[in-house]
Image (cartoon, helix red, strand yellow):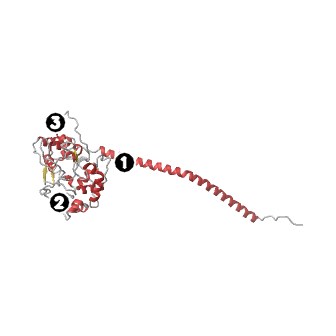
C-alpha cells in the first residue's frame, strides 16, 4: 500500500515561502502604485505645465506693467513745452510769441527760398529739427535754452546770446543767412524760446530737454547696416534718395531732405554722429517716442553713420573750435589735440578718444 502522508514542512521552508509571498505582495503593491502614479503623472503633468505657463505669463505681464509704469513715470517727469496762459501777458508780447512759434513751425513760408518775408534759408522748417515747435521731450527742444543763455560755447570760443544761437541755426541747419538782430523775426524767435523756458530755473537743464545722450558704441559705425535701416524705416518718408518730400504747394517739405543741397550743412549740430543718433533714437521713424521707440541704440548709431556720410552743403568751419582741445569727440574735422584720425572722430570707435581726454585732462 502506497504511503500518501506528506512530510510536514520545516520552519525554515515555511519562512522562505512566506518571505517569497511577502516579496511578491510588495512587488504587486509597487506595480500597482507605479501604475497609479504614472496615470496621475500623465494626467497632472499637462495641468502643471499649463499652470506654470500661466504663472510665467502672469509674472511677465506684471514685470512688463511694472517697467511700463516706471517708464511712464520717467516720461511724465520730462520737460514738455507749452504756451500756457496768455492772460498775464500783454497782447503785443503775446502776438510776438505766437509769431515766433509760427516761424519755428513754418519757417519756409516766411524765410525759405520763396519766403514772403525774405528768402534766406534752404526750405526746411526749424520744426524739422526742433520737433513739435521745440516742445517735444528729447525732440531737440528748447527746454534749457532760455535758462542757459547767454553762455560760453567752445564752438565759437566766446559767450553767445540767444540771437547768436538762433543765427547759428539759420546758417547751419537751414544752410542760409543770418537774421538781423533787431528784426521782428529775431525778436519773435527769442520771445517764443524765452516763453517756453519761463518756468525753468536759471542755469538749470531739465530732464528731457535737448537731445537724449546715448551710450557710445563699442565699435566703429557700420554705414552699410545704417543704409539697411534707412531703406527699411526712413525711405518711405524721406525718399530713397534722401531728398525728402515736398507738399503740394511746393513751398514746404512734408518730410525734409536728409542730405543734398537742400539739407543741413556740415556745420550743423546734427552732422555730429552723437547728436543725430540721440535725436532719431526716440523720435524716428514716424510714431516713435520715448515710451515707444522703434530703433535700437545700435540702429540709431549706424543710421547716423549712413546719413552723415552722404553729400551735403559745406561751410567754412575755420573759425570753429579755436581751442582745438575743446572739440567734441565726434567732430569730424581736424586739427585735433589728440592722435586720432578724422575718420575715427567721425565713425569711431569713440571710446579711445574719450579715454585719451579723460587721462590728459588738465
* Residue at the spot 56% in from the left edge and 53% down from the top edge: 42
Q: Nearer the viewer, mark 3 or mark 1?
A: 3
For residue 157, what is the image quadrant?
Answer: bottom left
Q: Quadrant of the N terminus?
A: bottom right
Whether residue 143 is visible to the viewer of this picture, yes or no, is: no
Q: Residue 67 has which mark?
A: 1
Q: Secondary structure under badge 1?
A: helix
The tag earlier along the polypeptide, 2 or 1, is 1
* Other residues around mark 1 within 10 Å, as few (<14) / some (14–19) / many (≥20): few
Percent position (x, y) of residue 293?
31, 49
Of residues 29 and 94, the one drawn nearer to the viewer in this rendering? 94
Mark 2 element type: loop
The residue beneath circle 3 is 95
User: Is 15 on the left or on the right of 345, as rendered?
Assistant: right
Residue beneath disc 2:
333
Residue 179 appears at what percent x and percent y?
Answer: 11, 45
Amino acid at each position: 500500500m502506497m504511503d500518501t502522508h506528506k512530510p510536514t514542512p520545516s520552519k525554515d521552508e515555511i519562512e522562505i515561502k512566506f518571505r517569497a509571498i511577502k516579496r511578491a505582495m510588495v512587488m504587486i503593491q509597487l506595480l500597482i502604485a507605479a501604475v497609479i502614479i504614472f496615470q496621475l503623472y500623465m494626467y497632472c503633468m499637462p495641468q502643471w505645465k499649463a499652470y506654470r505657463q500661466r504663472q510665467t505669463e502672469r509674472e511677465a505681464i506684471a514685470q512688463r506693467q511694472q517697467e511700463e509704469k516706471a517708464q511712464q513715470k520717467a516720461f511724465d517727469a520730462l520737460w514738455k513745452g507749452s504756451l500756457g496762459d496768455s492772460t498775464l501777458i500783454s497782447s503785443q508780447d503775446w502776438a510776438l510769441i505766437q509769431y515766433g512759434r509760427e516761424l519755428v513751425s513754418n519757417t519756409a513760408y516766411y524765410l525759405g527760398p520763396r519766403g514772403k518775408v525774405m528768402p534766406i534759408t534752404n526750405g526746411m522748417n526749424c520744426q524739422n529739427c526742433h520737433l513739435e515747435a521745440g516742445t517735444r521731450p528729447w525732440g531737440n527742444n528748447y527746454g534749457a535754452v532760455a535758462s542757459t543763455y547767454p553762455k560760453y560755447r567752445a564752438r565759437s570760443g566766446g559767450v553767445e546770446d540767444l540771437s547768436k544761437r538762433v543765427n547759428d541755426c539759420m546758417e547751419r541747419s537751414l544752410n542760409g543767412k543770418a537774421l538781423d538782430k533787431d528784426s521782428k523775426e529775431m525778436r519773435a524767435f527769442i520771445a517764443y524760446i524765452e516763453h517756453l523756458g519761463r518756468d525753468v530755473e536759471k542755469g538749470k537743464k531739465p530732464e528731457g530737454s535737448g537731445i537724449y545722450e546715448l551710450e557710445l558704441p563699442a565699435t566703429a559705425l557700420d554705414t552699410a547696416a545704417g543704409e539697411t535701416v534707412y531703406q527699411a524705416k526712413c525711405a518711405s518718408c524721406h525718399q530713397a534718395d534722401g531728398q525728402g518730400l515736398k507738399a503740394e504747394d511746393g513751398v514746404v517739405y512734408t518730410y525734409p531732405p536728409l542730405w543734398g543741397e537742400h539739407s543741413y550743412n556740415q556745420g550743423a549740430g546734427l552732422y555730429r554722429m552723437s547728436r543725430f543718433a540721440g535725436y532719431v533714437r526716440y523720435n524716428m521713424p514716424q510714431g516713435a517716442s520715448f515710451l515707444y521707440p522703434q530703433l535700437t541704440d545700435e540702429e540709431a548709431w549706424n543710421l547716423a553713420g549712413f546719413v552723415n556720410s552722404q553729400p551735403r552743403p559745406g561751410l567754412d568751419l575755420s573759425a570753429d573750435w579755436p581751442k582745438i582741445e575743446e572739440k567734441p569727440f565726434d567732430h569730424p574735422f581736424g586739427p585735433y589735440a589728440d592722435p586720432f584720425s578724422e575718420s575715427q572722430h567721425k565713425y569711431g570707435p569713440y571710446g579711445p578718444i574719450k579715454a585719451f581726454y579723460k587721462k590728459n585732462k588738465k
